[in-house]
Image (tube, rainbow, N blue to C red):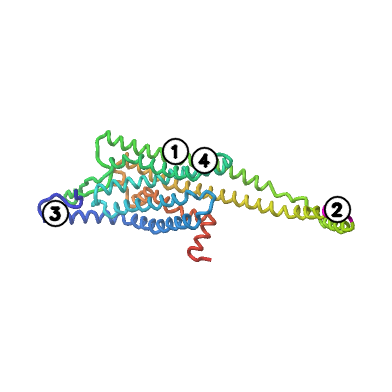
Amino acid sequence: MDYNTTQSLDPLEKIRDRALQLYWNEQYSDLYFPNTIVLAFYLIIGIPGNIIVILVYQFRLRKEKGGRYFITPLAYLDLLALIITASLNLTRNIRQVIFPSDASCKLLLYFSYVSTCSSLFLLNGIAVQRFQKICRPFGRQMNAFWKKVAICVCVLSSLLLYIPVLFYYGVIEIRNAKLGNITGYQCNKLPGTAAQMRGLSIFNGIGFFITICNVVVITVLYIIITVSIVKQVKKMNVIKVRPEQTSGPSSDATVLSNVTKSRTNNSQVAESSCTAAESSVNSMSQPGVEKQKTKQKTDSRTTAFRVSFMFMTISFVGFLAYLPSWTFILIETSNPLFWKNLPSTAFHVCLTLRRMYMFNHLANPFIYGVFDVAFRQEIKKLFCVK
């Protein structure tokens, strides 16, 4: 079915209706123009940022450890979510009442929900992995196989969870009485019976509840991780490398004196003295080896801690981005006239908050740059910055 033309048989009527339809759509385009600029800014920042993350972590830091395994799949999900959600929202802004087709509306909405939810679920899986790494270092860890399973579970769960979107949303007909009752076609929730509307409310409530549960689980896990890190840092500050009992100048002189005196003795005594001197030298060099090992362990722990704080920050930013979106989803579901009754300024503020979830998909590259020293170094090399 073509949503961009009316069913009038008169060609002149078709031209007139199409002109009025385009004029009506242009009014909406002007209204949504500030938000279109915001979405364009998201794309300009987010797409290159996530591509750089994928290139650096997948091809330049492949051998780096420290819990970075999930960064690449998270960047892929963020890139996909940003492209899909921007495509949906830009099409809504530019073609508000002449939306291309019912299929594009359903698919864009569906995959928008799936991609954003998969990203949130993956943050939950990352929190579990960091909990095992920091709080249960000697317990069972998530190996490469189970990390892949976790990613698949996150995506499959989202694909199944949001199947109802395909039935509750689509292109609907709307009319403008001020323009001669002209018909427009908008991507929105489909009209239905009272029971169907209750089903939609229940579906949105379940989505909001799952989001809150994810946030609560992530928050609790990272609180436990933070407490564990603080305790480990205190232990690292208290436990210092003890200087080994090394022989001083007088003992070294004694050893050398014994070796000199032993020349007059039999060969067995000489050999014994040389062995003693060698062991003394070895004992003198041992503290340096131990100090190096201790430094390596400290650096490894520090990297693990920084990665944990990095993912903690990503989860916190994700929570701040998702919360307004889900709040407005619940509001607009219970009050269909919510957006029509808002003043212009309030409309633009609320619309930006409604689509704040997109910010989560472009912020992560900057968070990596703040916390991951290796990532910053590779970025400098990539762009030839000293």
Is tag 1's residue or tag 3's residue first in the polypeptide sequence?
3
Label 1 sits on residue: 213
Asked if disc 1 and disc 2 are in contact, CB closer than 8 Å, the reply is no
- Residue 221 tag number: 4
Is tag 3's residue or tag 2's residue first in the polypeptide sequence?
3
Is tag 1's residue or tag 4's residue first in the polypeptide sequence?
1
Element assignment for label 4: helix
Of badges 4 and 3, nearer the viewer stands 4
Q: Residue 227 in the image: state x and y as whole percent.
A: 58, 42
Of badges 3 and 2, nearer the viewer stands 2
Of badges 4 and 2, nearer the viewer stands 2
Residue in front for this viewpoint, 180 or 288:
288
Name the residue furthest front: 267
Q: Residue 347 in the image: state x and y as whole percent.
A: 33, 50
Label 2 sits on residue: 269
Q: Residues within 10 Å of mark 1 (few under 14, many from 20)?
A: few
Q: Residues within 10 Å of mark 2 (few under 14, many from 20)?
A: some
Asked if disc 3 and disc 2 are in contact, CB closer than 8 Å, the reply is no
Is tag 1's residue or tag 2's residue first in the polypeptide sequence?
1
Q: Amino acid at mark 4?
A: Leu
Mark 4 and mark 3: Cα distance apart in space: 61 Å
> Which segment is the magenta one?
265-272
Q: Residue 35 in the image: state x and y as whole percent.
A: 34, 54
- Residue 14 tag number: 3
Q: Residues within 10 Å of mark 3 (few under 14, many from 20)?
A: some
Name the residue furthest right: 264
Residue in front for this viewpoint, 305 or 321:
305
